[in-house]
Every structure is written in structure tokens, then in C-alpha cells.
Image: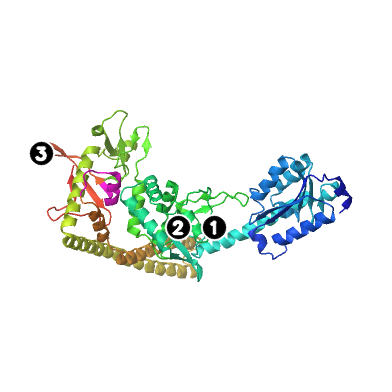
Amino acid sequence: MNNRHSSTIATDKITALYCRLSRDDELQGDSNSILNQKAILQKFAADNGLGNTQYFVDDGYSGTNFDRPDWQRLMALVDEGKVGTIIVKDMSRLGRDYLKVGMYTEMIFPNADIRFIAINNGVDSANQQDSDFTPFINIFNEFYAKDTSKKIRAVFKAKGESGKPLCTNVPYGYKKDPDDKHHWLVDKDAAKVVREIFKLCMDGYGPTQIAKLLTERRIENPTSHAKRNGLNPPVRQFYDDPYLWRDTTVTHILSRMEYIGHTVNFKTYRKSYKNKKQMHNDPSQWQIFKNTHEAIIDEAVFEIVQKIRDGRRRVTPLGEMPILSGMLFCADCGAKLYQVRGRGWEHSKEYFVCATYRKIKGGCSSHQIRNVVIEEALLDDIRRITAFAREHEDEFLQMVTQKTKSALDRSLRENKRELEQATQRIRKLDEIIQRLYEDNIEGKISDERFAKMTANYEAEQHTLEQRVAELRASIATEKESALNADHFLTLVRKYTEIPELTAEIIREFVERVYVYKAEKVDGKRVQRIKIIYNCIGEFALPDATTNEKTA
């Protein structure tokens, strides 16, 4: 490269020595280290008489990402006309996106009268001939970035499918095991705060209220807690106050399955290696590995909190949605009951109606029931059940246990019977297929006929084998499962009295409510409802034969 070009550079302008190192570059050894890049750039500048040098360093940034702190600082100086020369070790240090690199080298730098030098590639904008191959170099650099990204995604996928957590930073409430970075240990101080957040939600507090309480109590927020423990968590916005909590932080904590001891992978993805923005996968795409670490929150508590969160009433043009929205179901067709109300209506006029009845003519009957009627019936039943459970705990536990055992025994008998029938049919199909094969060998049926018949039998067999697997899994689960009466009692003890029905109370106690078709009894309109409670299912008090109530 010709040193005579140096005399043409204005000495009052900055000679920018730009260095970049990504995590992938570190794998290649010391050749691309920041120290090595600095030494090469400084020597070149000195040898070529380029003064007023200034380093610009981005350590840990991908070549496809141009939103780098020092690169942006350098571009700001370019816009101000303070830069005369930009030197990099090679074109890949500038970046690995050929379109963006080309925009800088072909448009921005020439327009700003900036000399650009890539030492190892022999590129010098002061010598047009040396720069003819620059576009090809950019394309090769992008190909490298694309190939590297592909390999990283493959490793990432394999790691995620093995059950190892993919997140770099552990969730608030946990810390990495010093002996195994893939295993999480409970952070006692943070875990205490997590439990408090879930408790407050169970008590009826929303994320905004919880965040306000934590801030008032001067409890350190997750970011500050992590930094104090030597971690560097990624945050979009930094706050000077280490005790400032945001409602979004609380909402995120309340939704994380990791707190019940599960590892959840593939919750997010990126559309391309050039786009660093994370997109959210549908929950059906998640891979969940159960009981990989110690739980902070009981699973029953977590499920109830999710119901509370899902059931929070949202403001619409007509105001907040009624407290029973999404909780009522048709006892005949199983569809949800649709809320009907109008602008200016009093609450006493609002009612629910079967969604099938509204959508499909003749598909079902209306099952119409007024809000105030079912709210009153539900409040009365919750009060009676909770009062009985509170005053007769031992009897309540015995009743639930006995009911659970009876239901479990019945379900096991039915599943085992179906399993035996399916297994016998599979064996029978094996015999049929074997006879067909022998008939085909002996020429009694044609190859075409054999193929058609066996295909049908094999399809049936495959379906049965899938059902057998489902039944065996169901039987294994049922043997291990039981209704959580103790947790229901914990809820009961929390409420000394229930003066009114709220959305939070409903979702804490009730799983769903079935509404039956109204009937005429002795000239009066009578309508039954069946209440399915969380943790205990259907429950009939000793003085009643059923928990189906008259509304």
C-alpha cells in the first residue's frame, strides 16, 4: 500500500481505529482479539503517517448488528465532519452484512470524504483499483455469518431438546449451581420475594398494586439484585432507583412456569440471523421439561394465579366485563355462555346465553340466565362450602378423599377395560394380517388386494396403538394424582368471610359452572347449575344429595 496517500489526509481530522470482537470470533483464538487488532491498527497508522488516532472498540457484538455503542459514536463524529480516515483490521471487523457494509463503503464514506482502509484485505479507498474486489469480500463475509448462525442454531436446538435451559440468565429467584451451570439452585432472598408476589396476587392485588407495594417496602428489583450478585442481566431501560418495580416485571414473574420447577425452552425465536428482535412462539411450540430444579411456587397456587390473571376484567366501550365472563358453560352442548348486555343497561338486565344457540339455529336451546341470579346462587354456595370446610376440617378432608378414591377407582376401571379391549384387537389384527400374507403368498388374493386390505388393518392398528399409549399414560397419571383438599382449605382459611363476589374470589375457588336448560316446576321457572370447584371438583354438603343448585 502506498504511503504517499497519507500526505493528502487532513491532520486535524480523526484517524479512527475501529475494533470489533464477537463471541464467535473468540473461538478462533487470539488473532482477532481486541489487543491484537489495536496493535495492528496503531502500527499501520504510525507507518503511514496517519496522526490524531483514536480507538473505537465494540467488544462482544455480532457483525450483523450495527447498533453497536462505539460504532454509533464513530458515526456521530462522521456526521459532524470530524473523521478523516477509518481503519479496520479486515472487512469482517466493519460488519458481515454486505448490504450495510456496502452502503457505508460505497455511499456514506465517499460522501463524507472519508478514506477507508481494511488492512488485511488490501482495501484502500484512496486507491480505486485496490477497492474493486471489496463487494466480493463483503459477500463472503456475509456468507460466513449466515453459515455460523446456522451452526449455532443447530447446537442451540440440540441443547434445548435435551432439556438443558437455553436462557443465559437464570430467572429471578434462582442462581446457577457452581458445580453445574445447567442446574439452578434457589436464591433464598429472591425466592422469598417471588412467593410474596404470588401471595399478593392470590390476595387480589394486580401487578401495578404489587409493584407499588414492593417499591414502598424498598425491596431490591431483579435487575439490581442480579447486578449486586455480579451478574449482567439484559435490560432495555436502566433505572437509577434500585428499588423501583414495574408492573411489567411483576406480570412476567407471575407467568413463568420455571417457578414450579420446570424448564421451558423455545419460548422465543428470531426470524433471521440479521434480525436480533426476539419473537414469541405459540405455547404449543414450547418444550417443557418437568421437575428439573427445585420449585419455588406450588403448582396448584401457580394454576390458580393463571386463572386469576386470565380472568381479570378488561375495560371495553361498555365498561369492565362481568365477573363471570368465560366461566359459564352449557350443560347440554358444552359451549361457553355468551354475555349479553347493552349500553345503559342496569346490571339486573344483563344475562348469559348459550353460544351455540346464538350461532347455529336449532343447535341448542338458549340456557338463558341473568347475571344477578347466577351470581347470587354462586356466592351462596361458596359461602356454605367454605363455612363447612372451616368448621369441620376433618370431616371435609374425609369426604373429599373418599369422593376422590371413588372417582379414581371408576376411572381406572373404565380405562383398564378399554385398554384390555384395544390390546386384544391389536393381537387379532396381527393374526388377520398374517393370514392375509399367507393367502397372498399362496396366490389366493392378488398383490393389489393384499396391499389394500393390509393398509386398512394397519391404519386401524396404528390408531389403536396410539390409544393404548394414551390409556397407559392416563392410568399411570391417575394412580399418582389426587385432588388437593389441603390447598382448598388454605384458601378457605384466607377468607374469614366473603361479603361479596369478585372475579378474583371466583377464580380462586371455582374452575367452571355448568348451566342447565330452564324448566317449569309447579308453574315456576327453575334452572339448575352445577359448580366445579378448584382442587376438590364437584362437592355436595352432607345435607344435600347433589351440588346442582336451583337458580
**Labelled pair 3, 2 in contact (Cβ < 8 Å):** no
Q: Amino acid at mark 2?
A: Tyr
Quadrant assignment, res 439:
bottom left
Q: Nearer the viewer, residue 162 or 422?
A: 162
User: Would residue 499 be counted in the magenta stretch?
Assistant: yes
Instruction: Tell me the mark number nearer the camera, choosing from 1 and 3.
Output: 1
Please give the residue where the numbered disc 3 appears in the rendered image. 522
Please give the residue where the numbered disc 1 appears in the rendered image. 232
Q: Amino acid at mark 3?
A: Asp
Could you tell which of marks 1 and 3 lies nearer the N-terminus?
1
Q: Tell me: 145 left or right of 376.
A: right
Q: CA distance from mark 1 to mark 3?
A: 73 Å
Q: Which residues are magenta?
A: 497-513
In percent of the image, x 25 and y 57: which residue is there?
488
Please give the residue where the numbered disc 2 appears in the rendered image. 172
Could you tell which of marks 3 and 2 lies nearer the N-terminus?
2
The 10 Å Cα crowd at callout 1, few under 14, some 14 to 19, many 20 or more, is few
SS for dot 2: loop
- Picture coordinates of residue 405, whole percent (x, y): 23, 64
